[in-house]
C-alpha cells in the first residue's frame, strides 16, 4: 500500500493520476484479503489502527461521494465509510471502478462491525466471532473503539481465550517446490511455522514505510545493526513492514517479520520469541515511540533506557536538564491551549518557533511573528494533533546551525562527525545542505559543541548513538535538541569517512564492546556535502519555500576537494540569500 505525505505540502492536489506522488510503501501479508488490508492500514504510520473503526471516519455523504469519484490518497477509507453509511455497493463500484469482489470484502467488514455493536464488553463476544474478527485483521484497538472501551480489556480477554497469532513462512516458490525462508507473517490459525530457538535473541525495530523525515537511511542503520548483532552471537530478528528493508537478502536477519511496527503485533512477537532485548535506536522516531510501551510492559530496551530517552524527547525535561548543566538554550514554553500560548509569548520575544511535541520531520512546525499568527498556528496544531502539547521556542534569527553525531559507551565519547549547515537555523536539518567536516566554525565554538555533547551524553546515560543540534549566534552556542538514536546523517557520515559506525554503535549498545576496542580511522580527502533532494515537480502549486517543516524526500552525497569548488560556492551564495533577504 502506498504511503503519501500530502500533509507536508499544504495546498497540494490530493488527486492521483499518471504522475507518482507517494513517497514510500508498506507490505502486509495475511491469510485473507481483509486481514492483509487492515494490516497494511496499521502499517501506514498515520495514526490509523486499521481500515476505519478508529474515530477517523467521515460522516457527510456528499463529502464521501466526492472523494470516491476523485481518485485520491484516502479513497480506500472512503469506500469503507460509504458502505458503512448504507450507500449501495453498486453505487460505490460505479463511482470508483473498483472490482465488485473487493467492495464485497470491505462490505463484509461493515457487517461484522454491525454485529459487534450488539455487545457491550469483550466478555460477551462469542469466541468464534472473536476469532473471525481477528482473522479479518481487526486490531484490539479497533474492537475497543467499536465497544467504546479501553484497549487493554480487549487484549486481556483475547489472550485469556487463547486467541493468539501464529507465524507462517513466506512461500517464495508458490507451493511448486518446498521452500524454507526466514521471512514470516502473522495470522490466526492452528499451526505455527516459526519455531523459537533456545539461542539468545535480539529484536531490531524498523522504521516503517519510507516517508518525509524517515527514509532509506534508517533501513541502512537497521541492516548494519542486524549484522553486528549476529557477529557477537545473537539471533537477530527484524520487525518491519517496509518491503525495501532486507527483502532481497536472506543473510541479513536470522528471522524477518513482515509485520506492522505497531504495538499489538510487536508484543505478540516478543512473547513468542522472548528476546534478551529490543533495539529501538536504529529505526528512527517510529521505533523510539514504542519505547514507552516496551518499558511499561517490562521488556528490556537495549542501550539507552526509556526514561533517559524520554528526557531528550520531552522539551520541558530536556530544557531543565540543560539549565542544570549550565548549557545555553533558546527560551521556551509549553502550552495546552491558546491562552497559555499567548501568555508565553508575553515572556518570550517574537519571532517564535511553534511546534507540537513528539513529531517527525518538523510536522506542523512554523515560525510566527505576532499574536494573530501564534493563535492560528496553535489552533491548527490542536485540530490536526489533538491531545498534544504545543512547544514555543524563541527563534534565533540569522543564526548558523550545526550538528554532532556521536557514540557514547558510558565512559568515552567518540565524535563521529561535526556537520555545518549551509542554510541558517530555521531551515529544517533534513532540508539543509550539510558540510562534513565543518568549514567556518571557530575553535572556541567547536570546543563548546564537543563539551556540551559530552555533558549531555553523560547526563542522559547514553549507551549507543546520539545526535545533537546547535544554533550559533554571535559565537554563542545554543543547544536546540538532542536525539538519543541514529539520525538521518549517521549513514552519511559512515559513508563519507569509510567507518562502519552503525556496527560499532550496535556492539556498544549490546555491551559486548567498548569504544577502546575499535581502531577508528576516518578517511576523507576534502569535504562531503549532504544534499537534500526535493520532489516539488510532483506537487504543483505548493509553497516551495523552505522552513522548519521538512519537505525533502531524499538526499545525496557530493564530494569536493576544497572550498573553492564552484558547487560549494553556489550553495554559499544561496545561504546569503536566506540570511539577508
Image (cartoon, rainbow, N blue to C red):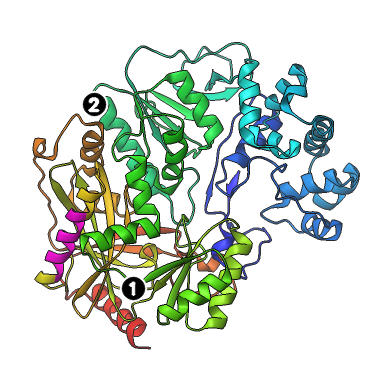
Residue 358 as seen in the image, left or right of residue 81? left
Residue 223 seen by the camera: yes
Residue at label 2?
231
* C-alpha span from label 1 to label 2: 40 Å
N-terminal label among 1 and 2: 2
Along the line of sight, the residue nearer the viewer: 361 or 552:
361
Q: What stretch is highlighted in magenta?
A: 445-455
The C terminus, quarter of image: bottom left
- Residue 512: x, y in percent? 19, 29
- At mark 1, the secondary structure is loop
Label 1–label 2 contact, CB within 8 A:
no
Give the number of the disc on residue 425. 1
Magenta region's main secondary structure?
A: helix
Q: Estimate the x, y position of residue 383 in percent, counting from the top left.
A: 63, 63
Magenta run includes residue 395:
no
Location of residue 563 (image quadrant): bottom left
With respect to residue 527, does 395 lie above or below?
below
Checking the image for residue 205, the label placed there is none
Q: Is residue 51 left or right of residue 80?
A: left
141 relative position to 257: left or right: right
Q: In front: 52, or 558? A: 52
Q: How many marks?
A: 2
For the point 40% across and 82% down, which residue is it?
A: 349
Q: What element carries label 2?
A: helix
- Using the rendered view, name the quadrant where residue 163 is placed: top right
Q: Residue drawn at (39%, 59%), measured in percent from left and top?
A: 315
The percent coordinates of residue 514 (x first, y second) are 14, 36
Does the magenta portion include 452? yes
Amino acid at each position: 500500500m502506498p504511503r503519501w505525505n500530502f500533509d507536508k505540502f499544504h495546498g497540494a492536489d490530493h488527486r492521483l493520476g499518471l504522475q507518482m506522488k507517494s513517497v514510500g510503501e508498506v507490505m502486509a501479508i495475511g491469510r485473507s484479503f481483509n486481514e492483509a488490508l487492515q494490516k497494511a492500514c496499521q502499517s501506514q504510520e498515520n495514526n490509523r489502527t486499521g481500515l476505519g473503526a478508529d474515530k477517523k471516519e467521515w460522516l457527510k455523504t456528499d463529502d464521501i461521494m466526492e472523494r470516491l469519484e476523485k481518485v485520491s490518497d484516502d479513497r480506500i477509507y472512503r469506500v469503507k465509510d460509504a458502505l458503512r453509511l448504507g450507500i449501495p455497493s453498486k453505487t460505490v463500484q460505479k463511482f470508483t471502478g473498483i472490482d465488485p469482489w473487493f467492495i464485497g470484502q470491505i462490505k463484509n467488514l461493515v457487517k461484522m462491525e454491525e454485529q459487534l455493536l450488539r455487545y457491550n464488553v469483550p466478555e460477551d463476544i462469542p469466541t468464534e466471532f472473536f476469532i473471525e474478527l481477528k482473522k479479518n485483521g481487526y486490531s484490539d484497538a479497533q474492537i475497543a473503539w467499536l465497544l467504546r472501551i479501553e484497549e487493554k480489556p480487549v487484549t486481556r480477554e483475547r489472550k485469556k481465550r487463547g486467541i493468539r497469532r501464529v507465524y507462517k513462512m513466506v512461500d517464495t516458490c508458490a507451493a511448486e517446490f518446498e521452500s524454507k525462508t526466514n521471512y514470516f507473517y502473522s495470522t490466526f490459525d492452528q499451526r505455527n511455522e516459526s519455531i523459537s530457538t533456545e539461542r539468545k535473541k535480539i529484536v531490531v525495530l524498523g522504521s516503517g514505510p519510507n516517508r518525509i523525515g524517515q527514509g532509506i537511511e534508517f533501513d541502512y542503520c537497521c541492516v548494519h545493526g542486524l549484522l553486528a548483532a549476529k557477529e557477537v552471537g545473537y539471533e537477530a530478528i527484524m520487525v518491519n513492514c517496509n518491503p525495501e528493508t532486507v527483502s532481497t537478502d536472506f543473510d541479513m536477519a536470522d528471522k524477518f517479520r513482515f509485520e506492522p511496527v505497531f504495538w499489538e503485533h510487536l508484543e505478540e512477537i516478543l512473547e513468542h520469541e522472548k528476546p534478551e532485548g529490543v533495539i529501538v535506536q536504529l529505526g528512527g522516531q517510529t521505533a523510539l515511540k514504542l519505547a514507552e510501551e516496551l518499558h511499561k510492559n517490562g521488556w528490556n530496551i537495549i542501550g539507552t533506557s526509556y526514561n533517559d530517552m524520554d528526557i531528550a524527547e520531552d522539551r520541558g525535561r530536556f530544557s531543565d536538564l540543560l539549565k542544570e548543566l549550565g548549557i545555553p538554550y533558546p527560551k521556551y514554553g509549553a502550552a495546552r491551549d491558546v491562552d497559555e500560548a499567548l501568555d508565553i509569548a508575553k515572556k518570550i520575544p517574537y519571532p517564535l518557533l511553534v511546534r507540537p511535541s513528539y513529531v517527525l520531520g518538523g510536522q506542523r512546525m512554523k515560525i510566527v511573528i505576532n499574536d494573530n499568527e501564534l493563535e492560528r498556528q496553535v489552533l491548527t496544531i490542536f485540530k490536526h494533533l489533538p491531545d498534544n502539547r504545543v512547544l514555543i521556542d524563541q527563534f534565533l534569527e540569522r543564526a548558523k546551525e550545526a550538528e554532532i553525531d556521536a557514540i557514547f559507551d558510558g565512559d568515552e565519547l567518540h565524535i563521529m562527525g561535526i556537520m555545518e549547515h549551509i542554510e541558517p537555523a530555521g531551515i529544517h536539518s533534513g532540508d539543509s545542505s550539510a558540510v562534513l567536516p565543518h568549514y567556518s566554525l571557530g575553535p572556541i565554538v567547536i570546543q563548546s559543541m564537543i563539551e556540551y555533547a559530552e555533558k549531555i551524553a553523560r547526563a542522559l546515560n547514553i549507551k549507543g548513538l546520539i545526535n545533537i543540534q546547535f544554533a550559533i549566534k554571535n559565537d554563542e552556542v545554543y543547544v536546540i535538541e538532542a536525539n538519543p538514536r541514529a539520525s538521518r546523517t549517521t549513514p552519511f557520515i559512515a559513508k563519507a569517512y569509510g567507518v562502519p559506525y552503525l556496527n560499532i554503535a550496535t556492539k556498544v549498545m549490546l555491551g559486548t564492546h567498548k569504544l577502546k576496542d575499535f581502531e577508528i580511522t576516518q578517511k576523507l580527502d576534502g569535504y562531503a556535502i549532504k544534499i537534500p533532494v526535493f520532489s516539488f515537480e510532483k506537487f504543483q502549486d505548493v509553497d516551495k519555500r523552505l522552513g522548519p517543516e521538512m519537505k525533502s524526500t531524499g538526499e545525496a552525497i557530493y564530494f569536493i576537494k576544497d572550498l573553492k569548488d564552484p558547487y560549494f560556492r553556489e550553495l554559499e551564495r544561496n545561504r546569503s540569500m536566506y540570511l539577508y533577504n
